[in-house]
Image (spheres, rainbow, N blue to C red):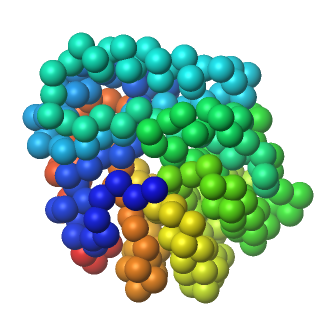
Amino acid sequence: MFFHDKTYDLDELARYNLHIHTTFSRCADREMILRDIVAAAEKAGLEMIALTDHNYPEKKNAVAAQKTELQRQLAGIDTKVKVLIGAELSSYGIGRFADDIETDSSLDYRLYATNHYHQDYWIHPEDKSPRGYCENMLAIMDKVIESGRADCLAHPFMAKYITACGDFHSVTAAFTDNEIGDLLVKGYGHGVAWELNVPAIMGDPVFFRRYFGIGKEAGVIFNLGSDAHKLRNIDLRQFLPELKKILGA
């Protein structure tokens, strides 16, 4: 499901921040309560935001409970910002999901992480070379796309959590243009958008310039998200000069 019209204009994409964490995420600052998130979004001139808290395999019922509580809080907030209550869901191995399909279907926005290799429950490939991790990541994303569970893939192809190869840039350098393009096209054909994740782009500018260029040529949908864990990171406009420089946009 796509939430805005296709565009490669970053100023247009910056009207929607579709990756924001609340205090339900262990890694978010304690200031990330819904009332203040919405106020920050209004100040930033955002039209739409997505709340995308992590899910954890040991707490399979947490996502549904979090949605219920966020809906309750949202009902008491008067705002023109469209708020999607979703989650950053986990596919922690090839065809492995940390939640059930019913949970997925209940959410407004299903953002799937496929490369949180720093988590202790994530399944690593036997081949821990850059190429081995490439093939593993491609296979995980492919299964997520085919499953029909996802609206968007979070920081796709990002390798910063992979430490077995030394310099993680060696992993993203090992993806071929054809592999990237074929998967982007497959995702688009299944109604899956591809995230432009601000921290990922800043951390691996050479790769993500290539990714953005291939995506534009393929005609896919990109969603922009700051992966905000702090209120000050909700306003996407502050990142635009650097993003435009990196992506050549």
Q: Is residue 230 left or right of residue 121?
A: left
Q: Horizontal and vertical percent for residue 51?
A: 39, 34
- Vertical position of residue 62 compared to residue 199: above or below: above
Q: Position of residue 69 (x, y in %)?
A: 43, 14
Can you tell which quarter of the image residue 72 is in?
Answer: top left
Above or below for 148 versus 226: below
Can the viewer see residue 147? yes
Q: Residue at x 14, y 40 (%)?
A: 44
Say which quadrant the C terminus sits in. bottom left
Residue at the spot x=30%, y=20% of the render?
74
* Residue 216, quarter of the rendered image: bottom left
Where does the image place residue 116, in percent across and percent down from the top left? 63, 45
Residue 155 seen anywhere in this rendered image of the structure: no
The answer to which of 180 and 87 lies nearer the viewer is 87
User: How many callouts does the rendering have?
Assistant: 0
Q: Position of residue 166 (x, y in %)?
A: 68, 58
Left or right, 125 with respect to 8, comes to right
- Is 207 in front, or is 13? 13
Tell me which residue sits at (69%, 55%) in the image. Answer: 147
